Image: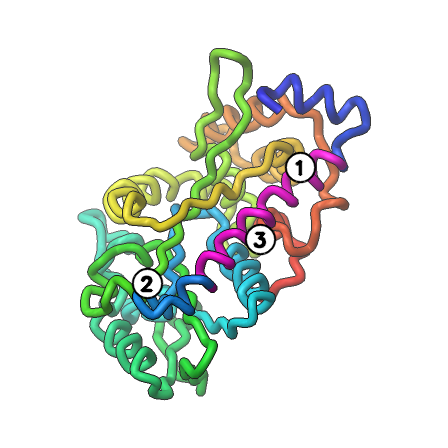
């Protein structure tokens, strides 16, 4: 599929299911290849991978990718364990702020990298370590008895927006690391001359997920988006070239599926607020796509992280 017209025509011809199946199969094929590469390096005495670092910008699908990769690593005979860099957030009162007083969660200083690196070193030495869990309701890091240990056949997966930032793992030898960057490179265009911005894909995902989870309204998510993008430019994109492999989480039929979820949410943005123009632009954009119900999206799909119905626990 090269453009919106081709996607719409395929859907009108009754091929929406096939588009979904092929897109999901291509992603799974890539995940299998990554798992097999990690497995080969795990058993390579010169490059014994023990730590898989997974990052990407907001709403790129890092969490679901990590879970699907874990399954394929198990199929290779490895025993993956995982946690998120978010679990090492500093307590809310210590979170860096923007000049206007808003919390800067994208800042590397929002993560307690000293404690995280200490725990990583202990894990790589074979020690049992209690891993914290961040309570986003109280804004506190808690220790609830989650203990990890890297024994024979185990590999540690860490996902988060700062996972490829060398500051977090400066004291860990590079041969132990395997770095994955998740992108959302929309493979289709509006027509032969107008490309779809990749950020629109992620913004629609984030608006829907925030709304479904009851975290933020569409207006609030749109208002936060510029600072999120600014943080990505500063803290994520500079390190993407350090990745061993890149994974594209976008699907050709995604906008057609997102349309039915996004329309009522975008319509809730009041006309008399600054965020309305962006909501209106996104509404006009998704109307280029013929809507497709999500009933045939698999429960393990990356899209399920945003529209709900996933078989994974988040």
Whether residues under marks 3 and 2 lie with C-beta atoms below 8 angstroms apart, the answer is: no
The residue closer to the viewer here, 120 or 215, is 120
Number of the label disc, if any, that sits on residue 305: 3
Q: Is residue 208 left or right of residue 91?
A: right
**Distance from label 2 to label 1 (Cα)?**
36 Å
Q: Nearer the viewer, mark 2 or mark 1?
A: 2
**First in sequence: mark 3 vs mark 2:** 2
Q: How is the image coloured?
A: rainbow
The part of the image, by quadrant, that contains residue 256 is: top right
Vertical relation: 12 (above or below) 175:
above
User: In the image, which residues are magenta?
Assistant: 18-39
Name the outermost residue toward the top. 193
Residue 96 is at least partly visible in this image = yes
For disc 1, the marked residue is: 257
Q: Position of residue 56 (x, y in %)?
A: 39, 48
Compared with residue 133, is residue 311 higher up or lower down, i.e. above or below?
above
């Amino acid at each position: 599929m090269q453009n919106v017209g081709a996607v719409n025509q395929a859907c009108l011809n009754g091929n929406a299911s096939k588009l979904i199946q092929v897109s999901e199969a291509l992603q799974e094929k890539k995940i299998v290849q990554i798992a097999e590469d990690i497995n080969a390096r795990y058993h390579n005495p010169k490059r014994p991978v023990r730590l898989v670092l997974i990052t990407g910008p907001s709403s790129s699908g890092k969490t679901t990718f990590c879970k699907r990769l874990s399954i394929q690593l198990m199929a290779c005979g490895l025993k993956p364990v995982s946690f998120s860099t978010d679990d090492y957030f500093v307590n809310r009162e210590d979170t860096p702020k923007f000049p206007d007083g808003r919390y800067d969660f994208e800042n590397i200083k929002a993560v307690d990298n000293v404690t995280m690196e200490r725990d990583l070193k202990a894990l790589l030495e074979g020690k049992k370590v209690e891993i914290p869990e961040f309570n986003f309701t109280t804004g506190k890091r808690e220790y609830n008895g989650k203990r990890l240990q890297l024994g024979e056949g185990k590999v540690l997966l860490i996902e988060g927006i700062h996972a490829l930032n060398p500051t977090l793992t400066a004291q860990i030898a590079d041969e132990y690391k395997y770095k994955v960057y998740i992108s959302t490179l929309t493979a289709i265009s509006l027509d032969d001359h107008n490309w779809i911005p990749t950020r629109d894909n992620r913004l629609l995902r984030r608006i829907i997920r925030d709304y479904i989870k009851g975290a933020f309204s569409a207006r609030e998510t749109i208002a936060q988006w510029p600072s999120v993008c600014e943080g990505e430019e500063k803290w994520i994109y500079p390190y993407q070239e350090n990745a061993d492999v890149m994974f594209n989480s976008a699907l050709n039929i995604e906008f057609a599926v997102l349309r039915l979820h996004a329309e009522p949410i975008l319509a809730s943005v009041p006309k008399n607020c600054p965020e309305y123009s962006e909501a209106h632009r996104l509404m006009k954009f998704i109307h280029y796509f013929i809507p497709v119900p999500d009933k045939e999206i698999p429960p393990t799909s990356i899209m399920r992280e945003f529209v709900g119905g996933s078989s994974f626990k988040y």
